[in-house]
Amino acid sequence: MRMATEAPQIDVEEQIKEEQSLTRPWSVIVHNDPVNLMSYVTMVFKRVFGYSNDRARKHMLEVHQLGRSTVWTGEREKAELYVQQLHGYQLLATLEPSD
Amino acid sequence: MRFHLTDSGVIEITQMNLLIAEFMRQAPFEADPGRSEAARDRLFSSPMQAEHLDAEFLEDWHDLVRPELEDHFRSANEIVARDLVGLREEPGPVLGADHGDGHHPWFNLRIPVDHLDAWLSCLNQARLVISEKHGFSEEDMEEQLDRSLTGKRNMALFQMHVYGFLQELMLDVIRVSEGESSQFDHFGSEEAEDDDDDEIVDQDRA
């Protein structure tokens, strides 16, 4: 005897949205705050992203002078991990879709 | 105050006066946001700005990431608290003639280099919590301190600066360990015994 089965309902639109969310690039942004030391922020960028001293310092100065810096862009999952690591150093960091 | 990295990988902080030693002792407690919502919000800030909010992601962050961050911060503070058990008093400079035959107390502390990350975290948390509790702005941070240090607010600001200075010394150890040059002349050198190398304002002379 064959049991009748129902085909799963696939919301194609939702699936496309999900795929786009995962494949579109996301940016990690670090925001300025008056407390974190510049040398500390530089160290954190070197540690988390493996940046050279010059690159880490460049991003630190952007944060300090412009209020924010886009420190990394790439896959969303990795962006989430980087933001978590930056929060572990008490930096103000967010992720957002890259333009 | 003197800050010296020994060959055995231990940082010796010596000749701390009573005020600095007390600030050190308070660091793990100052790092606790307690009931301050502003301090808590700062330590555990949102990973997304308002215009990009993703409710599901934020819920996962709150349930999964935030407890990890809390553990991470707590663990660092516990390491610092254990190191501070080793804070030792010794006789310092002689008190003036008006004060009899006594000595100013000096304090020493040894910190394993392996604990530097924990110290940096604890001191940073303390600075952030103090700042949020007192509502310090960027202007407050950059202003010259009132040398009389009267009032809770001034003292809190001074405490933040002391913690910041200790962080700078520790960051210097990390820089040197990574092959960069020290930013502090006396650092790591037993030859620099000159009093002019003292980096902290001696509160006794303030």
Image: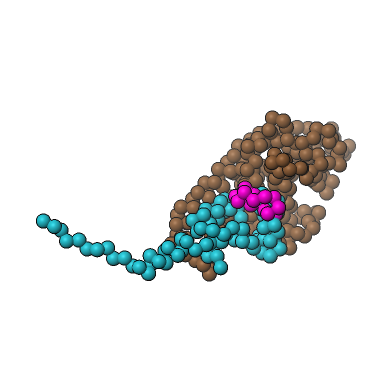
Chain colours: A cyan, B brown
Percent across and percent down for residue B85 are 63, 35
Front residue of this view, candidates A18 and B26: A18
Residue at the image position 73 percent from the left and 63 percent from the top: B139
Percent across and percent down for residue B49 are 55, 65
Question: How many labels sit on residues?
Answer: 0
| Depicted B122 relative to depicted B140: above or below | above
Front residue of this view, candidates B205 and B12: B12
| Depicted B193 relative to depicted A38: above or below | above
User: What secondary structure characterizes most of the magenta part?
Assistant: helix
Residue B187 is covered by the magenta coloring: no
- Taking the image as shown, residue B78 lies to the left or right of residue B140, namely left
Residue at the image position 75 percent from the left and 38 percent from the top: B3
- Asked whether residue A15 appears in the rendered view, the answer is yes
The magenta region covers: A45-57
- Asked whether residue B35 appears in the rendered view, the answer is no
Q: Residue furthest top?
A: B8
Q: Quadrant of residue A92?
A: bottom right
Residue at the image position 60 percent from the left and 51 percent from the top: A49
Percent across and percent down for residue A29 are 59, 61
Q: Residue furthest left?
A: A1
Q: Residue furthest right?
A: B97
Percent across and percent down for residue A23 are 47, 61
Front residue of this view, candidates A95 and B91: A95
